[in-house]
Image: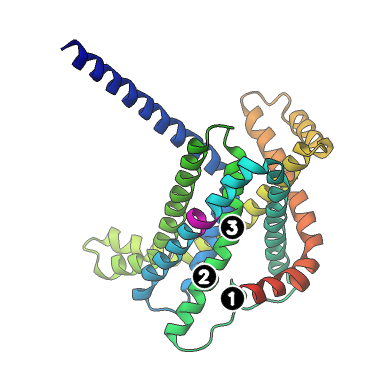
C-alpha cells in the first residue's frame, strides 16, 4: 500500500509538472504571438482579396487550402529552421528580424504610395493577373496566397522566436508550434468570417423573421466595404509600426541603440505629467515615431523592392 501511495504521489507530481509546462508554453506563446500583431493583421487584411472572382461556394474551401498551406509553411519549414537558428546561430536572429522588418516597411510604404497615387499596381495581391479557367485560376490564387503567407509567416515565427525566453529545446519547440497553430487558426478563422460576412448579412436581410434582424443584415452588407478599407488602413499602419520597431530594437541588440534610446526618451518626456494616461501616451508616441521611421525606410526601399526583389522573387517562386 505504501508503494502504491508513493507511485500515486509521483504521478501527481508529474501531472503538476506537466500542467505547469503547459501553462508556461501557453503563456510564452501568447506573449510571443502578440509581438507579431502587425504581420498577423496584414495577413488577415490581404488574404480576403484572393477570394475575389469566385463563387461563394468556393470561398471557404479556398480559405482552408490557404490555411493548410500556411500551417505547412510554419510547421514543416519555418519551425525547424527557427529552432536550428536558436541552437546554432542565435546571432543571426537580429539581422533576420531586420530583414523581416524591412520587408514590412517596404510593403507598408508601397501601400501608402499607391493610396496617394504614386506607382502602379502589379496585378493581384500576389503580383499575378487573373486569367484562365476557374480551376486554373483557383490553383494560381492559392499558390500565390501561400507564397505571400510564407513571407509573413517567416516574419511571425522569427518575431516569436526572438520573444521566447531562453529555455530547453522542447519548450521552445512546443511554444513555436503553439504560436504557429494558434496564429494560423486566429488569422484564417478571421478571414473566413470576413469573406462570409456579406453572405450572412444578405441571408439575414432576406430571410430574417424580425425587422431588427433584416435591418442588421442590411447594415452588415453595407458596412463590409467600409470595414475592408478600414482593415487595410489598420494593417498598413501596423506593418509600418511593427517594421520600424523591429528594426530599431534589432539595431539596439546589435550595439547601435542611439535611435531606440532617443525615441524612448522622447516618449517618456511626452508622457510626463499625464497621470493615469502616462502609459498610453508613452506607447502612442513610441508607436507613432516607430511608424514614421518605418514609412521613411520603406519609401527608400520601394525602388529596390519593385525593380529588383519582386521580379527575382516572382521568377524563383512563380505564382
Counting every numbered tag in the picture gives 3
Location of the C terminus by quadrant is bottom right
In the rendered image, residue 39, in percent from the top left (x then y), is placed at: 59, 53
Write the start and end of the magenta stretch as one range: 73-77
Residue 214 quadrant: bottom left
Question: How far is disc 2 from disc 3 in space, using C-alphas?
Answer: 16 Å
Outermost residue on the left side: it is 1
Q: Residue at x 50, y 89 (%)?
A: 132
Q: Is residue 229 visible?
A: no
Q: Is residue 76 magenta?
A: yes
Q: Which residue is mark 2?
A: 49
Q: Which residue is mark 3?
A: 152
In the depicted view, which residue is nearer to us: 159 or 237?
Answer: 159
Question: How far is disc 1 from disc 2 in space, using C-alphas?
Answer: 8 Å
In the rendered image, residue 48, in percent from the top left (x then y), is placed at: 49, 67
Q: Secondary structure at mark 3?
A: helix
Amino acid at each position: 500500500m505504501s508503494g502504491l501511495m508513493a507511485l500515486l504521489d509521483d504521478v501527481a507530481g508529474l501531472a503538476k509538472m506537466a500542467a505547469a509546462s503547459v501553462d508556461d508554453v501557453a503563456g510564452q506563446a501568447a506573449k510571443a504571438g502578440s509581438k507579431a500583431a502587425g504581420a498577423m493583421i496584414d495577413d488577415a487584411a490581404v488574404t480576403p482579396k484572393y477570394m475575389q472572382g469566385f463563387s461563394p461556394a468556393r470561398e471557404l474551401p479556398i480559405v482552408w487550402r490557404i490555411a493548410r498551406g500556411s500551417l505547412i509553411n510554419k510547421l514543416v519549414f519555418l519551425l525547424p529552421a527557427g529552432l536550428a537558428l536558436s541552437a546554432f546561430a542565435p546571432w543571426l536572429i537580429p539581422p533576420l528580424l531586420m530583414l523581416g522588418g524591412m520587408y514590412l516597411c517596404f510593403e507598408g510604404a508601397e501601400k501608402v504610395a499607391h493610396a496617394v497615387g504614386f506607382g502602379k499596381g502589379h496585378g493581384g495581391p500576389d503580383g499575378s493577373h487573373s486569367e484562365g479557367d476557374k480551376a486554373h485560376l483557383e490553383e494560381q490564387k492559392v499558390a500565390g496566397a501561400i507564397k505571400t503567407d510564407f513571407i509573413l509567416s517567416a516574419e511571425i515565427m522569427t518575431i516569436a522566436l526572438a520573444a521566447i525566453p531562453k529555455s530547453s529545446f522542447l519548450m521552445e519547440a512546443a511554444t513555436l508550434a503553439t504560436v504557429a497553430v494558434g496564429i494560423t487558426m486566429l488569422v484564417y478563422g478571421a478571414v473566413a468570417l470576413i469573406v462570409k460576412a456579406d453572405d450572412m448579412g444578405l441571408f439575414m436581410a432576406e430571410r430574417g423573421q424580425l425587422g431588427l434582424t433584416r435591418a442588421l443584415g442590411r447594415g452588415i452588407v453595407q458596412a463590409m466595404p467600409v470595414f475592408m478599407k478600414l482593415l487595410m488602413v489598420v494593417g498598413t499602419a501596423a506593418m509600418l509600426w511593427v517594421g520600424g520597431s523591429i528594426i530599431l530594437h534589432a539595431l539596439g541588440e546589435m550595439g547601435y541603440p542611439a535611435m531606440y534610446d532617443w525615441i524612448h526618451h522622447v516618449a517618456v518626456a511626452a508622457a510626463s505629467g499625464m497621470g493615469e494616461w502616462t502609459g498610453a501616451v508613452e506607447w502612442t508616441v513610441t508607436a507613432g515615431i516607430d511608424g514614421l521611421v518605418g514609412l521613411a525606410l520603406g519609401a527608400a526601399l520601394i525602388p529596390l523592392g519593385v525593380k529588383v526583389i519582386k521580379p527575382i522573387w516572382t521568377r524563383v517562386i512563380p505564382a
